Amino acid sequence: MKILLVATAFNSLTQRVFTALRDRGHSVGVELALGDDQVREAVLRDAPDLVVAPMLTSAIPREVWEAVTCLVVHPGPLGDRGPSSLDWAVRDGARSWGVTVLQAEAEMDAGPVWASVPCPLAARGKSDLYRNEIADAALEAVLLAVARFASGSHTPRSQDEPEVRAAVRTRPPMRQSDRRIRWESDPTETVLRTLRAADSQPGVLDELLGAEWFLHGGHRAHGLGGRPGEVVATRAGAICRATADGAVWIPQLRPRRRPGGPRTYALPAVTALGERLAGVPEVPPPPHWGPGRREWSDIRYREIGATGFLSFTFPGGAMSTGQCRRLLAAYREACARPTAVLVLGGERDFFSNGIHLNVIEAAPDPAAESWANINAIDDLVQAVLTTTDRVVVAAVGGNAAAGGVMLALAADEVWCRAGTVLNPHYRLMGLYGSEFWTYSLPRRVGEGVATALTGQALPVSAEQGERIGLVDRVLPTPAEGFALQVVDLATRWAATAGVQARIAAKKDDLDRREQAKPLSAYREEELARMHAIFFDPGHPYHALRRAFVHKETPAATPEHLRALAAARG
């Protein structure tokens, strides 16, 4: 069918629906919901058989849903209504939830039901759940609804039915007053649920060290505590704040926007607070993480038999200069261990999205910080590419983009969770790219496909990635089960003769490639292009970075998405 996606943003869920529908042979266009007139014009221009809205914060115009069937994804179970559905579920500690696909009508969330799919809710942040459990259920519901619509024989379920009407629950928007943390009395579990329900937007507004901040993210701290509300420690850029019965780690802060001032954005908490943290001790993580260790850190290493697992998880998938250097140090330590297989990644949610644009934007000299960041991630990728004494597996449990994709491609094997979305391109940020992409990407998919991927700048599903050679293995597992499945596969594989044969061939293969063209040449060529971009104040990269960091609303649907409609005729 000819399907038009209408969405507030081309976000992770919209991209996942986009790639899945295209993988199944549908002709898919995208229009951002930037105004009623633009949506009307897009539907008139594109003449779709069906409109699907995976993520929409405004109503579809009446003229549109009267002219063509419009299916809206609501992140709540049958009967749930309201704009803060998932926020309430996380804050209330719900362990099961669902996603419903409704037909757009005059009343929000009240149209006929085309599909409703249940899902579990792990004890995770809202944004993590949205990209994983909610996205899994949403995709299943969308595909079911699309198939039912295509059949021409399905009648959607009216919400006027007594059974459905009895389940209707309309919840109000969640305000900051609903998100308030009472540090003196709230136990750690309550604080965690409150923080998780606001991650990554809008954050929890709070007073801290003489200023107002939005708190982003939350992890339980073990063995730490103090006067409730007090910052008692730092680790890996995060602050540890005492609760009534323990403490929580908070990775990011965003200053409250001043009236009439520019939009603010999240930064690592230690970076945001700066000198305000004078005297607060830094508590490093244990050097080795056994299976029973539960302390939070953004980088962990553990071993099971002949397999090492170096996992990392950075908010939003962004990797600053400091984070890249710490991960490189951990990688080198892991490579000093007597293992045959080293798994890089393996956590749920984002794998990596490359350099940290927020930290770059906040730096006194963004060009210099961009340069430092790209060199730091290049050092990490080069270390992976030149590892010849063991097999390296990139375990991609969540989405990856730009340099994050190239970090994964530096490994010998790329294993992705089913449903992962990859964006192997840089063009939308005005960048040429580095991280040895001119070496790794063509080696994987060939020059022609590499040119198409980087030029079209469209997302690729893990399943499509496997078909074109970008991915070696797709693991059909829920988000919570990904790490365990990776452990099982990697530890069993490490004991096979095939791994030893693979290791024996690695050095000769790298030597042959170095003779043809050294890795240093790829790096120099890429960095020469990036240096020219970073240190040109008028280059589009700087304006595009600012727009991304400050979440500026685009004036129109981006050209690379508009081109989809033109290509469809």
Image: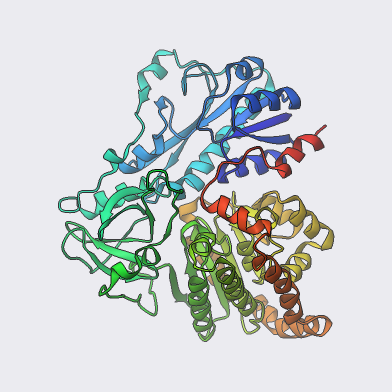
Q: Nearer the viewer, residue 208 or 81?
A: 208
Where is residue 288 drawn, in percent x and y?
39, 78
Where is residue 18 drawn, in percent x and y?
65, 40
Relative horizontal placement of residue 122, taking residue 220 as reference (left or right): right
Where is residue 277 drawn, in percent x and y?
29, 69
Where is residue 276 drawn, in percent x and y?
29, 67
- Quarter of the C terminus within the rendering: top right
Q: Is residue 73 above or below residue 223?
A: above
Relative horizontal placement of residue 344, taking residue 92 as reference (left or right): right
Q: Quadrant of residue 537?
A: bottom right
Q: Nearer the viewer, residue 367 or 96?
A: 367
User: How many marks are shown on the rendered structure?
Assistant: 0
Would you say residue 23 is visible in this rendering?
no
User: What is the basis of the colouring in this image?
Assistant: rainbow
- Quarter of the N terminus within the rendering: top right
Q: Nearer the viewer, residue 389 or 111?
A: 111
